[in-house]
Image (cartoon, helix red, strand yellow):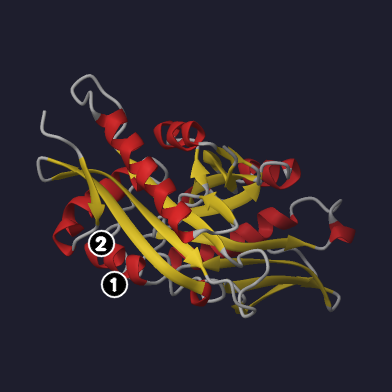
Amino acid sequence: MPALEVRPFRRVDRDQLTELINTHVAAVVPGVSVSVNTVLAALERQPYEFVTDPWVGERVTLVAEQRQHVVAAAHLLRYRADDEVGPAYRDIGEIDWFVCRPPASFRPDADEAADLLMNACLAQLARWKVRARYASGELPAPAVYGLPRTWPHVRARYERAGFRHTGDTEVILIARVADLPTHEPRPGETVDRTLGECGTRFTAYAEGRALGFIEVDTSLSRPERHARGTGLADIGNLHIDPTVYGEGGLAHRLLGQAADWLRLCGVDRLLAYERATDATMIDRLTSAGFRELTRTDRGWEHRP
């Protein structure tokens, strides 16, 4: 077999890299893919990370190639060490994402390519002389962050290289909008629609008091970002006043109100993200029609 080569990304790799990224996205969220333009833009900057992206001092994208075929790729970030950078990010290096073909009988060199690329990533982090090394799987697609459990081949590379999971685990859930509760107004309760922090907000009121709210973001599938995945939205926030937790059905009624709005928007699927430790909220969502897609582990630190 021709020798494997690890080298910097070149623009001519864009189609093969996008295909490799989309195979990983598809294992997390059904029916979603990203465009070549989305991938190229994400290599240059992350405009949706408006707080942390300006802190990045250097970006490097590496690919592993064999017979002019990109079989693995990784994107690395070095955060600056000056006082403008938040303390948690100051002078750190990160593998922002790492994608590779899983081992298979017809692809016996997949492990070798992934390991060769990981060695190159560690060498780059060493050249940067950063104070700490982290890793993640932040592909430019909705609900793809941390290290999804549907990527065991990537997890194996991280663990073999000395990365350890040190952060939280989140549950990614999805529901068909048609399966969500129908909106059933309750006497004395009103719902107002306003602009929220993470999308359109629906707030339930009773006797002039806000009982809780839900925010839904319907801008996940902007045409300039995604080639496929229309009809998808996510819950940006779902909050119930702790003093009314015992009042059954409020979360379902808010979801029903949001579902009415999503149907008008042409949205047919709704995503939600919750910490694995928040069993109460996960139970509320599953009882309302959500089901678990996968779990994703956030926060990987290099501890060789």
Q: Residue at x 42, y 69 (%)?
A: 58
Q: Nearer the viewer, residue 284 or 172?
A: 172
Residue hosting label 1? 224
Q: Amino acid at mark 1?
A: Glu
What SS does tag 2 mark? loop
Q: Nearer the viewer, residue 178 or 202?
A: 202
Pointer 1 local density, CA inside 10 Å: few below 14, some 14–19, many at least 20: few
Q: Residue at x 66, y 46 (%)?
A: 168
x then y, percent, for residue 28: 42, 43
x then y, percent, for residue 196: 62, 77
Residues at discs 1 and 2 in contact (Cβ within 8 Å): yes
Residue hosting label 2? 35
Q: Residue at x 73, y 45 (%)?
A: 278
In the image: residue 16, left or right of residue 229: left
x then y, percent, for residue 143: 48, 53
* Of pointers 1 and 2, the one earlier in the residue sequence: 2
x then y, percent, for residue 160: 47, 31
Q: Is residue 85 visible?
A: yes
In the image: residue 227, left or right of residue 184: left
Quarter of the figure with residue 43: bottom left
Quarter of the figure with residue 292: top right
Which quadrant would the C terminus be assigned to in this image? top right
In the image: residue 242, left or right of residue 157: right
